[in-house]
Amino acid sequence: MNRLAQSTFVYLTLGLLVLLAVLNTVQLHNLENKVAELRQSGGPSIAARSDNNAGQTAAASSPTCPTDPEVERDLAAPGNLLKPGRRPKDFPANAQLGGTLRRQTAQDPPGLNYMASKNAADVHEIYLYVSNTLAQRDVDDPDRWNAALATSVTTDDEGLSYVVKLRKGVKWQKLAVDLNDPRYAWANVDHEVTAEDFKFTFDIYQNVQVGGRAAAGRSAYSHLDKVEVLDTYSFKVTFKERLYVNFGLVVDNTPMPRWLYLYDENGQKFDDTNWGEKLNAHWYNQKAIGVGPYQFVSWETGVKIKLERNPNYWDCAQPAPFDRIEMVMLKDPQAWLRYLKTGQIDYTQVMPQQYVSELKGKEPYLGEKGLKIGFHDELSYFYIGWNQRRPFFEDKRVRTAMTLAFNREALVENVFGGLGEVVSGPYVKKNPCYDQSIAPLPFDLEQAKKLLEEAGWTDTDGDGIRDKVIKGKKTPFEFSLLMYGGSSEYETLARIYREDLLQVGIKLNPLPLEWSAQLKQQESRDFDAYTGAWVPDWDIDLKPIWHSSTADQPASSNYIGFKNAEADRLIDAHRQEQDPEKRAGYCQAFHRLVAEEQPYSFFYARKRPVLYWDYVNPLFTVLYPYRDLRYFSFNQPRE
């Protein structure tokens, strides 16, 4: 019996070992499949999650980024309009996680409240790092939307409404205040991102008391019907019209923490009647908050803004490439290259005159063998905007004359270093909306004089400046041009343009201003003309800048007061059209209209040189050519 029992025990033990071996093989196989899925989706596995990742490669193979079965089910569900997130195809394999990237920026931003601050590119860039949107355009395919804070977006009525399901467990960053101070005890708790935070974002757009970015984008949401919170992690957005831009208006949104911006510094809730006004001057507006890969640390005005890796970032498959980002304020462009050469910053954009005088054909750059240069096209266009509320620029013949006297080709070549191409309309040439058959107007002073004569502007007193009787008073054609005061190129442009305009009998007075001061005058409509630039979204929406309904809206982007019934018809048809080819036809027709009306003197689309140290991997993407550090990295360990 003992021998039989022993034999039975041996067989049972052997069977158990075989079973364990089989289970181990199955688990290993499943694990390998998960790793393969992560690699295929472009999300590199990360070897460790620590505050200091210096020396850790972004292609580390240890699979410690767990998958969420609920998220996987949402993404795979029929009708979901989102795709799994992935890194760009060109993200370098030698990318090293960690270190501090220091970059130049030309000015302090106008506040750091994403919605209530002025609609500045610097603020938008900071929130690329500090926060996330519901979904993100794919870098390699901009028509694809990748899941971010949302795991599912569906529509049952072909785009009239959308149901959004949120990722669970995403935490808001802690406030950048002394949380040991009892004053902030009310805020020193964990807050999860919920549907209420996104509803609050839409509430801000609809609250006419709020200025800044919300005011500038308000017209885009004029057809919003309602936003309903379905539960903690889902909400429904319904529009009054089925427009092709609806989907982007939903998913390209950053949440706003309702638990913060509806309360004063002592945790007391604002009144329902004036919370919008309170938001404009909120006590936390000089700081940033979000749920993204980096968190705000400090802003020393005129010196730098500091961001640090968010240790609790939800997306472990695509971590922050740096431990820290420092945005160093350098108003004087002449200091940019000096700071780079001495190693105080790691990369910088380069002004055209700097490129021509200090870099073009002069390797090694700045005498340093470790410096490299890159070029990229920007998704932006530059222009001069004519305020049609002013009597000078009411007549399209006058506006056309202003363009004919604007020697754009020569300016791009000789002042802006040949780094760009003159455009004839309100898009970049890569966009399907751009009508390639419309050539820019030539430089022609004689034709400009002829048009001014036809419009009634003549020199009646022989002083060399044209004049006209307006409301019973003789008015000389003398105007001011608002212009960004930190650019030597624009100072040269204004000087050359002034000389050419004098030849046709017009006096230009350049008015260089700090960006915040210029923007204030534009928003108040207190200007004759201004130099500007737009970075259009990939899905063009013409309404915020060009529709008559926005001309008189406070702080809207239609600074020049452009009103045109045919333009309105084309804009409305373009917004409603779901077919991409027909939609391109409408916006190309709009291109032809503005080429005739000349509300702007369209200048050029820029090609930007960037100078950087060879330990930096810059990835210039189509959507954010040089301003998206989420896709930059170091190629060697750095502190």
Image (spheres, rainbow, N blue to C red):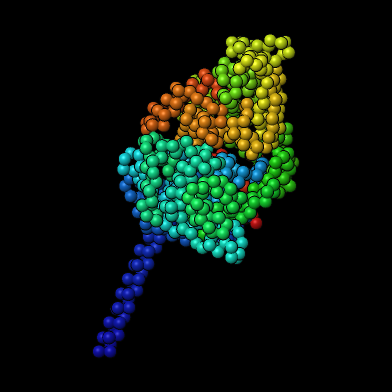
Q: Position of residue 318 (x, y in %)?
A: 50, 52
Task: Check the image and report above or below for 327 versus 187.
Answer: above
User: Residue at point 57% right, 44% down?
Assistant: 117
Residue 324 location (% of width, % of height): 61, 54
Q: Residue at x 35, y 54 (%)?
A: 73
Quadrant for the N terminus in the image:
bottom left
| Identity of the residue furthest to the bottom in this view | 2
Q: Is residue 24 left or right of residue 342?
A: left
Q: In this view, does 35 lie above or below 624?
A: below
* x and y percentages locating residue 334 in the rendered image: 73, 39
Q: Is residue 466 visible?
A: yes
Q: 247 or 21: which is nearer to us?
A: 247
- Locate the C terminus and report the quarter of the image it occupies: bottom right
The residue sitting at 48% across, 45% down in the picture is 204
| Relative height, residue 251 to residue 14 (above, below) | above
Report whether residue 49 is seen: no
Drawn side of residue 49 relative to residue 514, left or right: left
Judging depth in this view, the residue of 107 and 227 nearest the camera is 227
Q: Quadrant of residue 339?
A: top right
| Residue 444: quadrant of the picture | top right
Query: Where does residue 404 sit, x and y in percent of width and height?
Result: 61, 17
| Number of dots carrying numbers | 0
Q: Is residue 38 above or below residue 333?
A: below
Residue in view at x 60 percent, y 46 percent: 111
Residue 185 occupies quadrant: bottom right
